[in-house]
Image: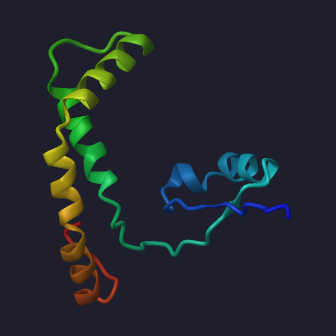
């Protein structure tokens, strides 16, 4: 028996995700995209990790001078993120969900 894997890509409605070029590329590569409501709450803890990474990158001394320098600094900052920070983000999930339910899907602090 041959199994077919169906993958549906999910992303939010950030303008870069909804750009015509992005939609064209996804379509040309036959990538199905999950319909996602506009202004839906983003409960994904990874967003907070990216925010922390950005904050740490901006605190580094000096300017980022080129792509290789950026890559090296991203790796440095990534390797400095400890597992406890990630676990704390994951532990916020019940509160995130409760806040979204309380706000009937509207704005939350998350």
Q: Is residue 28 left or right of residue 46?
A: right
Residue 54 percent coordinates (x, y) = 26, 36
Q: Residue at x 27, y 46 (%)?
A: 49
Foreground: 65 or 6?
Answer: 6
Foreground: 5 or 36?
Answer: 5
The residue positioned farthest toward the right in the image shown: 1
Examine the rendered structure and indicate whether residue 74 appears above or below residue 19. Answer: above
Residue 63 percent coordinates (x, y) = 25, 14
Residue 103 percent coordinates (x, y) = 25, 86
Q: How many marks?
A: 0
Foreground: 33 or 21?
Answer: 33
What colouring does the structure picture have?
A: rainbow
Q: Is residue 82 left or right of residue 39?
A: left
Examine the rendered structure and indicate whether residue 97 appears above or below residue 5. Answer: below
Q: Is residue 47 left or right of residue 32?
A: left
Q: Residue at x 20, y 57 (%)?
A: 89
Quadrant position of residue 110: bottom left
């Amino acid at each position: 028996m041959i199994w077919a894997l169906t993958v549906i890509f999910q992303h939010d409605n950030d303008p870069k995700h909804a750009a015509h070029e992005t939609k064209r590329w996804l379509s040309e590569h036959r990538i199905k995209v999950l319909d996602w409501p506009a202004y839906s709450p983003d409960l994904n803890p990874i967003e907070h990790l990216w925010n922390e990474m950005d904050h740490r990158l901006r605190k580094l001394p000096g300017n980022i001078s080129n792509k290789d320098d950026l890559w090296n600094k991203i790796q440095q900052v990534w390797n400095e993120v400890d597992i406890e920070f990630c676990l704390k983000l994951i532990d916020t999930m019940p509160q995130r969900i409760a806040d979204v339910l309380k706000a009937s899907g509207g704005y939350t602090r998350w």
